[in-house]
Amino acid sequence: MKRISIKDVAALAGSSPATVSKVLTGMPDSRIPEETAQRVRQAARQLRYVPLSLAQQLRHKRTQTIAILLPELLPFTSDITHGIQARATAGGLTTILGLHGHDSAVEAQHLRLGLRGQVDGLIIAPAYHNRNHHIYAELKDRGVPFVLVDNDLSGCEAPYVGLRNEETAYHLTRTLIAQEATLIGGIFGGGITLDNPGGSTALYERFLGYRRALAEARLPDDERLCVPQPGEGPDEMFVRLMTSQPAIDGVLWGSYQFIQPTLNWLAAQGMHVPGDLRFTGFDKVLLALSTAEDYQGLQVIREPWPAAVQPGYEIGVRAMELLKQAMVGNQPKERQRILLPPHYEGVTQ
């Protein structure tokens, strides 16, 4: 069978081989219109074009390297990394780590490691507001194994490992209700609205679990309590809630990353948690104490609040196991979506 060449792709796309090469290798060139780039990628997918260097590696050898692509290194994502690395090292694989900071352009650079055959597979926590669906589709079309963790991608059929987000948020909210909170705010970020998941499937699932618990308890489920205004950050939303809804007596935090700035504001108001306001949230709070305000914020916390600690290490282990299956061609036909329970601390179940 004749091997598909770059000239074949160029002919189908109505473009030049040089343009095809620049598009498929990710070479920056502002003179190539996006419409042309999309046409080239579509032609490559249709013809199942594989670059020569990648084809040679697939025939002769592997790199014995996998890429881990995460938004940042925090305790939860660090645990994921350690889980992946433990399984990878045991299997004789080397890992490389890339951080995209939820920047789709940076994410795209790392994803192209798979397209160029520089790694044998990838484990990815996708960026919020993702603009790289075409690269994920191309990875799949070329048979490059990859597994998603933490933040799922709609329309992507790759295996996924994450938390039971909706169920967990439901139990966290029920805990606030059991503590007799009657007006409960939800801080999720990610551009979430009542009918739009925003950029994060994980945060949106938590949003749904929070709302389900409120509906069951017949408590106020007003969008002003849980939906940010355009351009509003989580800490700004919290301050707006506290000043516009002074009766709020409970808050569910969709991520502990959002909390520290609000503690400084609470300290300025002379308020304490849980004495004046009840909190629940995901993971243990990591505080960076670098200013006098930070130390004042720490004084707000009178005792630990109920939390759901995500099993980051186990997520990493399970993701690596799925990737290994895909790398040897044992991936099931039906998509695998593994959802793990958290470790609860002081949570009503």
Image: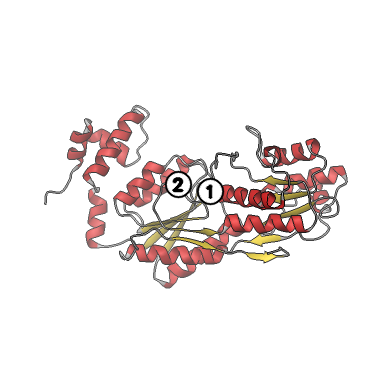
Label 2 packing within 10 angstroms: few (<14), some (14-19), many (20+): few
Q: Give the percent coordinates (x, y) of residue 294.
A: 78, 48
Residue at the bottom extreme of this rendering: 90
Position in image of residue 180 (x %, y %): 80, 55
Q: Residues within 10 Å of mark 1 (few under 14, many from 20)?
A: some
Identify which residue, 185 or 43, lies in the foreground.
185
- Which quadrant: the C terminus? bottom right
271 lies above or below 178 = above
Check the image and report above or below for 343 versus 247.
below
| Number of marks in the rendered image | 2
Determine which quarter of the picture holds residue 26. top left
Q: What is the x, y in percent for residue 206? A: 61, 51
Residue located at (30% from left, 49% from top): 141
CB under 8 Å between callouts 2 and 1? yes
Query: Can residue 5 be seen by looking at this rendering?
Result: yes
Residue that extends furthest to the left in the rendered view of this protein:
1
The image's colouring method is secondary structure
Return the residue at label 1: 201
Secondary structure state at the residue bearing disc 1: helix
C-alpha span from label 2 to label 1: 8 Å
The disc label shown at residue 154, or none: 2
| Image vertical order of residue 176 relative to residue 30, above or below | below
Mark closer to the chain start, 2 or 1: 2
Q: Is residue 4 left or right of residue 179?
A: left
Residue at x 30%, y 39% (from the top left corner)? 41
The amino acid at mark 2 is: Ser
Residue in front for this viewpoint, 166 or 256? 166
Query: Percent from the top left, x then y, of residue 322?
Result: 41, 64
